[in-house]
Image: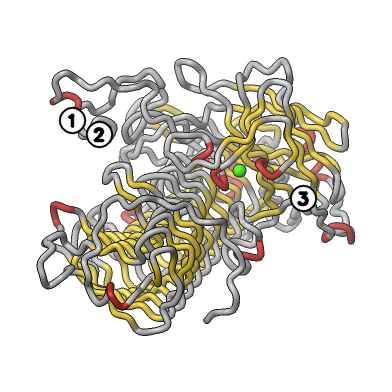
Amino acid sequence: MCRTSRFVLCLTVSYALPLYAVSVTHTASVTRAALDPSLVADRGANAHFVEQEAENAVTDGTIIGPDRTAYTLPAEASGRAAVQLLPGQYVEFTLPKAANAITVRYSIPDSPTGGGTTAPLNVSVKGRSLVTMTLTSQYSWLYNQYPFSNDPNADLLFPDQYITECACVPSATTPPPIITKPFRPNHFYDEQRLPLGHTYRAGDKIRLTAPASSNAAWTVIDLLDSEQVGSPHRDESAVNVQLFGADPTGQRDSADAFDKAIAFAKLWHREVYLPPGTYQVNRHIVVDNVTIEGAGNWCTIVKGHQVTLSTPLPDGSVHTGVGFYGKYAADGGSSNVHLSGFAIEGDVRERIDSDQVNGIGGALSNSTIEGLYIHHTKVGMWLDGPMSNLRVHNNIIVDQIADGINFHTGVTDSVVANTFVRNTGDDALAMWSDKIEDANNTFDHNTVQTPVLANGIALYGGTDNTISSNLVADPIREGSGLQVGSRFGAQPFTGSLWITNNTTVRSGPFELNWNIGLGAIWIFALEGSINADIQVVGNSFLDNTYNAIMLVSDFPVKDLYTITNVHFKDDRVDGTGTSAVSARVAGSASFENVDARNVGAVGVNNCGSFHFTPAGSEFTLVDLGSNDGGGTTGPWLAPWELPNTITCDDRPPVVPPPPPSPWATPE
Ligand SMILES: [Ca+2]
């Protein structure tokens, strides 16, 4: 059914976009990251689709949330709320623009022993039943301690490790603590794309119904994306993989046909074309000095099964699966690779860190990746440098077991822009200067939503990198919106780091291991001091669950490492559950024109390095002027707090702020 309608979509001659495409009815409730789009103008990716939250739609089901508590369904939902349908109930969206395709983000229960189940979801448009989707929980529901289990009934994976639930090491505790099962359920959601086979108009209603006969006890709908997919891209001059035996019905394995087409294209200096269809590929396609273009990521789908290997590969993998890989740097790396316009559909259901089961991998210098949709792989793009000059534009990466994109080891002069990342199981976008520093890279105008573990955007060491104009929403646990961390053995931060014009929302979550609240931007000196020039300019930190800004070390190393040379300027803080700034480290930071409002606790929660001497905190705030606004306890940066008054409070009461609202022109 799905494939048939996809072909209808992919063979459809593009409609001229009708005039009513721009008309928006008042019931349509388009948001971006569950915010009024006007609050995040020019921040994040300019996606092809429009997003509507189920909790704003019409339903006879039950709204769950808002709730930001880890391991709960609403916490992992966009906007921290969703709609729960019992069999027979529906949620109905009004299309804000003409659309011929939708994406549904949902959750259904796991099977009792793990591994997932399937359930139907009826889609009707304009009152007519269109199709029944088959939802799955085979790619969601993980449990237990890192790196997780698919078994809800599993005992603790590591009983000899401290857990916060009992504040103890279970195997060393008498009597042993009672561990509730399932232990730490998470990664509840998945999403699915559906071509509608026809262009519907703005104002048409799309109803999603859990059939009365559904086997699923409940069906949670988080949101609906809708879009007008254009006609398929064609290239008659390129080398068509089908001429080499690739099977567009997905029945036969097409990996060897891809290799042959690539070899032929390289010989004749031509491009490779993947016509509309679904191609089964169950291993890496190694690419070097080649261009591969699909018909568009709704039309050309490269899809694979996870394969268990009888002997591990030299790179440590015990599984393989679909992926486009440059040669590893140790083998010379790849260059001049250009991938565009197709989807990569993986089959990764568990986290095995040694497996190379990523959508894109290896080293890809002087290359471009554009217009891909990457789904159900371990990491969307895991680049192992050294490598340079990779341009990643206009991609969608969703439902990953681990990171969205990681620039790992000596990636330089590279860019990720206008890319949309949702539901990663680890950092959505990361630069990890492991052994060799990442330098001169930019993450610009990307949208990150609901990373279920770790950070929206994370920087682990490096020099002269830029994080600009991104939109980061709803990080859930053990991470935050933006992290600058000396961690994971990374090279130190050197040179400058520019964090400019980003917006975070519903960030600054609770840190379960520390049992305190984080900041939307979290600067963390764990393995060394952070003293590079860090410029945090023009950012908006909205609806922070706890703090907006946190600078912190870890208690065992609090007298070893400092954070200095951090400069905040022209930033806006709209709503903090607790403070605007939390400092739990020695060092200093400067503030200029950092305005705050709806601050729930004292503006600065300054603990320094916890010696509490009469000289004051070991952390100094430098007031460069125009730091205005505050909350119920007064101006956020009041003179009495300066330069280093101890105001340390591990757990101030949380005052949930009002929703973010327009901020008048900068003061
Ligand atoms: Ca939602």
Quarter of the view holding residue 594: bottom left
* Left-right relation of 219 to 180: right
Residue ID for mark 1: 169
Q: Nearer the viewer, residue 22 or 436?
A: 22
Question: x%, y% of residue 34?
Answer: 61, 52
Question: Label 1 to label 2, Cα distance in Å?
Answer: 6 Å
Question: x%, y% of residue 259?
Answer: 55, 44
Q: Nearer the viewer, residue 432 or 191?
A: 191
| Colour setting | secondary structure
Give the residue type that dot 1 points to. Val
Give the residue type that dot 3 points to. Ala
Are there few (<14), some (14-19), or many (20+) residues within 10 Å of tag 1?
A: some
Identify the residue shown where x is 71% and y is 27%. 121
Identify the residue shown where x is 23% and y is 68%. 563
Question: Label 3 to label 2, Cα distance in Å?
Answer: 44 Å
* First of labels 1, 2 by sequence position: 2
* Left-right relation of 151 to 288: left
* First of labels 3, 2 by sequence position: 3
Are there few (<14), some (14-19), or many (20+) residues within 10 Å of tag 2?
A: some
- Of the 4 image quadrants, the one containing the N terminus is top right
Residue ID for mark 3: 28
Residue ID for mark 2: 163
Q: Secondary structure at mark 3?
A: loop
Q: Is mark 2 within 8 Å of ligand 1?
A: no
Quarter of the view holding residue 566: bottom left
* Left-right relation of 243 to 12: left
Q: Secondary structure at mark 2?
A: loop
* Left-right relation of 213 to 15: left
Give the residue type that dot 2 points to. Ile
